[in-house]
Amino acid sequence: MDRDKIKSAVELFIEGIGEDKNREGLKGTPERIADMCEEILYGAGKDPKQELSVYFNEDHEELVLVRNISFFSMCEHHMLPFFGKANVAYIPKKGKLTGISKIARVVDISSRKLQLQERMTSEVADSIFEVLEPYGVAVVIKAQHLCMMMRGVKKEDSFVITSAIRGIFRKSASSRNEILSLLRD
Ligand SMILES: [Zn+2]
């Protein structure tokens, strides 16, 4: 990340909205925003697939379900946070598994950048589908968007729910309905 660019952009922004960039409370703000970007946008340019190390357990071809993975992301349209929980399920093929923490890590990397909830949902599903080559993957994400809560339609209590399904969950309506009902709250 280019900290100098971030800092001069924040200074310009402060001037642009008619504030005084030299007043006490704002003096350190460009520096603080640059620090914050390194922390909350560290997923930019990273491939979540690289987080998925594979291990083998020949006998296991049953559903693996990870619920309530919390995440914080930034809406790329408004640069305001959206945040919530991701539920992820897959059925391993030929015993090809990954650690539970790796699944959470994929959600993390995919969320920590300028993002859209729809794209994030597909990205998590595709990463797992490509690396583990399982029978199927399903991802459901439920989130609140500050850009909906603070501005525009001002729907403070609204949630956005997105899902992405791959493999057998896509092919069979009954397994799709079954997995989606398991993944919904
Ligand atoms: Zn937005």
Image (cartoon, grey):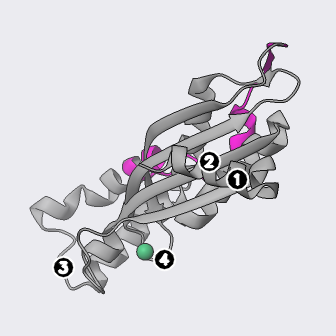
Residue at image point 76% right, 52% down: 166
Task: For marks 2 and 4, give the one nearer the viewer.
Answer: 2
Instruction: Report the amino acid beneath label 2.
Output: Glu
Residue 50: say if magenta: yes
Instruction: Report the amino acid beneath label 4.
Output: His
Q: Mark 2 vs mark 3: which is more N-terminal?
A: 3
SS at mark 1? Answer: helix
Q: CA–CA distance between discs 3 and 1?
A: 57 Å
Task: For marks 2 and 3, give the one nearer the viewer.
Answer: 2
CB of mark 4 near ligand 1 (< 8 Å): yes
Q: Position of residue 60 (x, y in %)?
A: 77, 18
Label 3–label 4 contact, CB within 8 A: no
Residue at image point 55% right, 56% down: 2
Answer yes or no: is residue 169 visible.
yes
Q: Mark 3 vs mark 1: which is more N-terminal?
A: 3
Answer yes or no: is residue 47 visible.
no
Residue 178 image label: 2
Seen from the viewer's position, the closer of residues 92 and 81 is 92
Q: Mark 4 vs mark 1: which is more N-terminal?
A: 4
Instruction: Report the amino acid beneath label 3.
Output: Glu
Label 2–label 1 contact, CB within 8 A: yes
* Residue bearing the label numbered 3: 19
Q: CA–CA distance between discs 2 and 4?
A: 34 Å
Q: Is residue 63 left or right of residue 152?
A: right
SS at mark 3? Answer: loop
* Residue bearing the label numbered 4: 77
Q: CA–CA distance between discs 4 and 1?
A: 36 Å
Q: Position of residue 114 (x, y in %)?
A: 53, 63
Q: Residues within 10 Å of mark 4 (few under 14, many from 20)?
A: few
Magenta residues, start to end: 36-58
